[in-house]
Amino acid sequence: MNCPKCNKPNRDAAVYCKFCGETVISKKTTALQDLVGLTDVKNKLQDIIQTAEKINERAKHSGIRIPVEMDMVISGKSGT
């Protein structure tokens, strides 16, 4: 699996890139990545999830929790 930030190869089981430290894949999104097609949608969702994970990680280290609300609507053609 290639890193979304630096595009360097990592192990398929990697969670963080060994080159730049970016989150490579989230355990929460493995089912999403298994879906066929809609690459742009999957990448956008991956970015949102990574942002939320980074905010949570920062809160763990600093002790300051910033509430973040994310509302979205995903729409498409019937059958998608």
Image (cartoon, grey):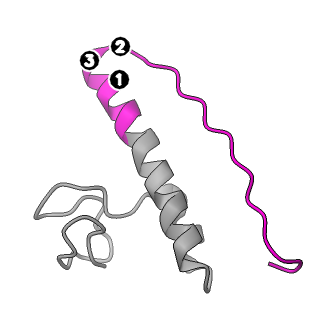
- Amino acid found under the numbered disc labelled 1: Ala
The residue range painted magenta reads 54-80
Contact? badges 3 and 1 (CB < 8 Å): yes
Q: Position of residue 56 (x, y in %)?
A: 40, 32
Q: Which mark is residue 64?
A: 2
Neighbor class of circle 1 (other Cα within 10 Å; few <14, some 14-19, many 20+) is few
- Tag 3: amino acid: Ser
Between residues 59 and 48, which one lies in front from this camera angle? 48
What is the quadrant of residue 16 in the picture? bottom left
Task: Kindly indicate whether the residue at mark 2 contacts the one at mark 3 (C-beta within 8 angstroms).
Answer: yes
**Where does residue 41 sit, x and y in percent of width and height?**
58, 69
Q: Which mark is residue 59?
A: 1
Q: Residue at x 62, y 86 (%)?
A: 36
**Gap in angstroms between the C-alphas marked 1 and 2:** 5 Å
Residue 69, relative to residue 16: is it above or below?
Answer: above
- The prevailing secondary structure element of the residues shown in magenta is loop
Mark 3 to mark 1 CA distance (whole Å): 5 Å
SS class, disc 3: helix
Q: Which mark is residue 2?
A: none
Write down the quadrant of residue 18 in the picture. bottom left
Circles 1 and 2: CB atoms closer than 8 Å:
yes
Q: Position of residue 33 (x, y in %)?
A: 53, 74
Residue marked by disc 3: 62
Amino acid type, callout 2: Ile
Between 13 and 73, the one nearer to me in the picture? 73
Q: Secondary structure at mark 1?
A: helix
How far apart are the alpha carbons under marks 3 and 2?
5 Å
The residue depicted at 20 percent of the width and 79 percent of the height is: 9
- Density class for disc 2 (Cα within 10 Å; few <14, some 14-19, many ≥20) is few
